[in-house]
Image: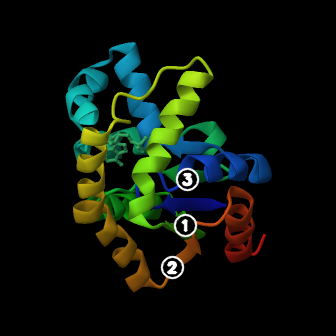
């Protein structure tokens, strides 16, 4: 199963990806998680990406395509993967098509979580509060200023990715405003699982 989860920041992609990992036994490939790990480790990629991530902007296509290209060649991704937060631009979607074609691989589904944008900021604030309550560290970009930039990046650069897959007839849309369990059910429904 090779799957893409699309949707704006705060739509619940990470939560649903974790459930799909359990169900299908395939890894969640989150470019956001991988970039945060690179920042934490102080790698060259991390140093390049940190400022733009903290401000809520998008890291260059070249960097994230390089990360994904390496990652999908790893052994645990052989049976499939769930892409979370990638592709975020049409150029990334095209690069992914090329990468997969070279490996004679196809995507099984692209699932978009549709959410009311007005609900997103409060979801992000809730996520930050829950992280603090659990003793964790809040993401540097989970604040209102960076969130505005992230939402703008989504509208300008990522919304066209949905149109890209819709035009190919591979896009499935799910109501991301439902409860977490109902969203999971709806995703399983469109996957026929
Ligand atoms: P996320 O955890 O998916 O919300 O990503 C956090 C941040 O990492 C984003 O706001 C971007 O700065 C960066 N990022 C993650 N994935 C991508 C991507 N596919 N393209 C560009 N930037 C990305």
Ligand 1 - quadrant of the structure image: top left
Q: Can residue 186 be seen in this view?
A: yes
Q: Which of marks 2 and 1 is in front?
A: 2
Q: How far apart are marks 3 and 2 (CA)?
A: 21 Å
78 or 37, nearer to the observer: 37
Q: Which residue: 48% across, 33% down?
A: 128
On the image, the x and y values in percent for residue 48 come to: 21, 27
Q: How many marks?
A: 3
Q: How far apart are marks 2 and 1 (CA)?
A: 9 Å
Badge number at residue 96 = none
The answer to which of marks 3 and 1 sits earlier in the sequence is 3
On the image, the x and y values in percent for residue 104 come to: 52, 64
Q: Which residue matches tag 3? A: 12
Say few, some or many: other residues with alpha carbon within 10 Å of mark 2 (under 14 / 14 to 19 / 20 or more). Answer: some
Q: Quadrant of residue 142?
A: top left
Q: Nearer the viewer, mark 3 or mark 2?
A: 3
Q: Answer yes or no: do the residues labelled 2 and 1 have beta carbons within 8 Å?
A: yes
Q: Can residue 85 be seen in this view?
A: no
| Label 2 residue SS | loop
Q: Relative to 75, is 193 above or below? A: below
110 or 128, nearer to the observer: 128
Q: Relative to 167, is 60 above or below? A: above
Q: Please identify the quadrant where the C terminus is shown.
A: bottom right
The answer to which of marks 3 and 2 sits earlier in the sequence is 3
Q: Distance between the residues labelled 3 and 1?
A: 21 Å
| Label 3 residue SS | loop
Q: Which residue matches tag 1? A: 107
Mark 1 residue CB less than 8 A from any atom of ligand 1: no
On the image, the x and y values in percent for residue 180 come to: 68, 57
Q: Which residue: 59% across, 44% down?
A: 28
Q: Answer yes or no: do the residues labelled 3 and 1 have beta carbons within 8 Å?
A: no
Q: Which residue matches tag 2? A: 170
């Amino acid at each position: 199963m090779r799957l893409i989860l699309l949707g704006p920041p705060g739509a619940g992609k990470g939560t649903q990806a974790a459930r799909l990992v359990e169900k299908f036994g395939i890894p969640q490939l989150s470019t956001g998680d991988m970039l945060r790990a690179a920042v934490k480790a102080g790698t060259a990629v991390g140093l390049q990406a940190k400022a733009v991530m903290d401000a809520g902007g998008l890291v260059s296509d070249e960097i994230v395509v390089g990360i994904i290209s390496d990652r999908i060649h790893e052994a645990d991704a052989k049976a499939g993967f769930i892409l979370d937060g990638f592709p975020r631009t049409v150029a990334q979607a095209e690069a992914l098509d090329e990468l997969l074609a070279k490996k004679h691989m196809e995507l099984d589904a692209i699932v978009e979580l549709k959410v009311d944008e007005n609900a997103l900021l409060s979801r992000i604030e809730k996520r930050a509060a829950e992280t603090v309550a659990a003793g964790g560290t809040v993401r540097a970009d989970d604040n209102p200023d960076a969130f505005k930039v992230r939402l703008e990046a989504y509208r300008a650069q990522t919304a066209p990715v949905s149109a890209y897959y819709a035009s190919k007839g591979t896009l499935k849309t799910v109501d991301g405003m439902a409860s977490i369990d109902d969203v999971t059910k709806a995703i399983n429904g469109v996957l026929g699982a």
